[in-house]
Image: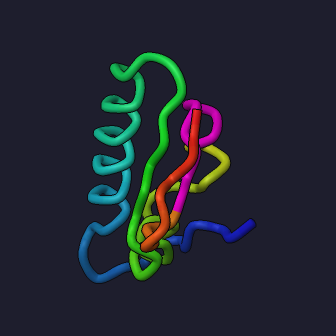
Amino acid sequence: MAQIPNLDNAPINLASLRDQSQKELLNILRKARGKKCLVIDPKLGGSLSLLIQTSLLKEYGVELRHLSAEHVQTE
């Protein structure tokens, strides 16, 4: 599992930006009842991992899928 980079010594307060973005995403996920499927462009996967760990998404009932030409099969 990839670790989220430490931003404590960044020239600007990136840690605060990441924390706020993560809180907003988790708040949206809390409001959506039941299982969720997050479909993202594969190019954004690395960027998403800078914001939040996939294990935390799974705790909120999120199934992570990459966008493709094929239909997404999910519950």
* Residue 30 or residue 38, whichever sits in front: 38
Q: Position of residue 49 (x, y in %)?
A: 52, 67
Q: Position of residue 60 (x, y in %)?
A: 55, 31
Q: Is residue 75 above or below residue 31?
A: below
Query: Which colouring convention does the figure follow?
Result: rainbow
On the image, which quarter does residue 28 sit in?
top left
Q: Is residue 7 visible?
A: no
Question: In percent of the image, x 29 and y 47: which residue is there?
Answer: 20
Q: Which residues are magenta?
A: 58-65
* Residue 52 or residue 29, whichever sits in front: 29
Q: Is residue 51 above or below residue 41?
A: above
Q: Is residue 66 visible?
A: yes
Question: In percent of the image, x 27 and y 59: which residue is there?
Answer: 17
**Apparent side of residue 62 relative to residue 32 in the rendered image (left or right):** right
Q: Is residue 63 located in the magenta-colored stretch of the structure?
A: yes
Q: Position of residue 29 (x, y in %)?
A: 40, 31
Q: How many marks?
A: 0
Q: Is residue 17 above or below residue 59?
A: below
> Which quarter shows the C terminus?
top right
Question: In percent of the image, x 50 and y 53: which residue is there?
Answer: 72
Q: Is residue 50 above or below residue 11?
A: above
Question: In percent of the image, x 53 and y 71: which residue is there?
Answer: 6
**Apparent side of residue 68 relative to residue 75 in the rendered image (left or right):** left
* Residue 46 or residue 4, whichever sits in front: 46
Q: Is residue 27 located in the magenta-colored stretch of the structure?
A: no
Q: Position of residue 58 (x, y in %)?
A: 63, 40
> Which quarter shows the N terminus?
bottom right
* Residue 51 or residue 36, whichever sits in front: 36
In the image, farthest residue toward the front: 70
